[in-house]
Amino acid sequence: MTYGTPGALLVVISGPSGVGKDAIIEKLKESGDRYCFVVTVTTRSRRQGETEGEPYHFISADRFEEMIKKGELLEWANVYGHLYGTPKQPVKEALTRGQDVILKVDVQGAASIKALLPGAVFIFLAPPSMEELRERLRLRKTESPEALQLRLAAAQKEMKTLPMFDYVVVNPTGHAEEAVAQIAAIIAAEKRRVRPRIISL
C-alpha cells in the first residue's frame, strides 16, 4: 500500500557523531514549519540535560527486542554498544495525512532506510573539517579518550558514504542557522519536483 500524497516527503538527516544533528533538528523545530519529527528509541542511558522524548525515547533492551520482533521499527542499528531504532507507525501516520517527516539517524540507519525506501530525501550533515569535529567531540565531554578516538575513526569511514546521499550540508560551528536554511531550501526544491517522490511502506 502507498502512504502519503505527492509532495509529502520523508527527509533523512544523517552524519557522523558530533556533527550537530540534534542541534539542527531543534532549530528546524523552532522554524515554525509543519514537519513531523519522529523520535528515535534507544537503549542507552540518558546524558545530563536529556529528558524522555528529548532527544530520544529511552527504553529497555527487552522492549527494543520486542519492537524488532513485532516489526515496529523502520530501521535499527547497534551503535557503540547501544541500540537505536526508528518507530515505523508515526512515519506511516504522518505521510498518510500528507505531512513531511524528518528523521535523524546514523549512517547505518540511513543505509537501511535507503534500501527500503529509496524515494526518501537523504541529507548528509558534514563538519567543516575533521579537526573541527574532533574539537566538538572533545568539548562535549561525554566520551573517554578511547571512545573519542573510536568515534573519530568511525567518522572517517562515515564520510566515505557520501555518494549514498542526495545532498551534503556543512554545519559550521556557531552558525547552525546556515545549515538549517540550506536544509529548508532542499525541502522547498524537492516540493517542486516535476515527478514527486512517493514513499511506499
Image (cartoon, rainbow, N blue to C red):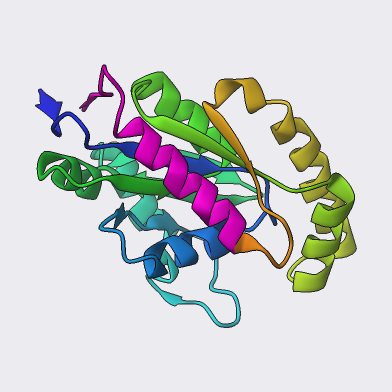
Name the residue at 43% across, 48% down: 184
26 in the magenta segment: no
Name the residue at 71% across, 68% down: 174
170 to 164, vertically: above or below? below
x then y, percent, for residue 158: 70, 34
Q: Is residue 75 left or right of residue 195?
A: right
Name the residue at 73% across, 26% down: 160
Q: Nearer the viewer, residue 109 or 67?
A: 109
What's drawn in magenta, residue-wise? 177-201
193 in the magenta segment: yes
Q: Nearer the viewer, residue 116 or 133?
A: 133
Residue 59 appears in view: no
x then y, percent, for residue 88: 26, 42
Q: Is residue 175 left or right of residue 148?
A: left
**If the image is split into quadrants, where does the C terminus sit?**
top left
x then y, percent, for residue 166: 52, 26
Q: Residue placed farthest to the top in the image?
A: 195
**If the image is split into quadrants, where does the N terminus sit?**
top left
Q: Nearer the viewer, residue 45 or 140?
A: 140
Name the residue at 13% across, 24% down: 2
Q: How many marks?
A: 0
Residue 78 appears in view: yes
Q: Quadrant of residue 28?
A: bottom left
169 to 166, vertically: above or below? below
x then y, percent, for residue 74: 33, 37
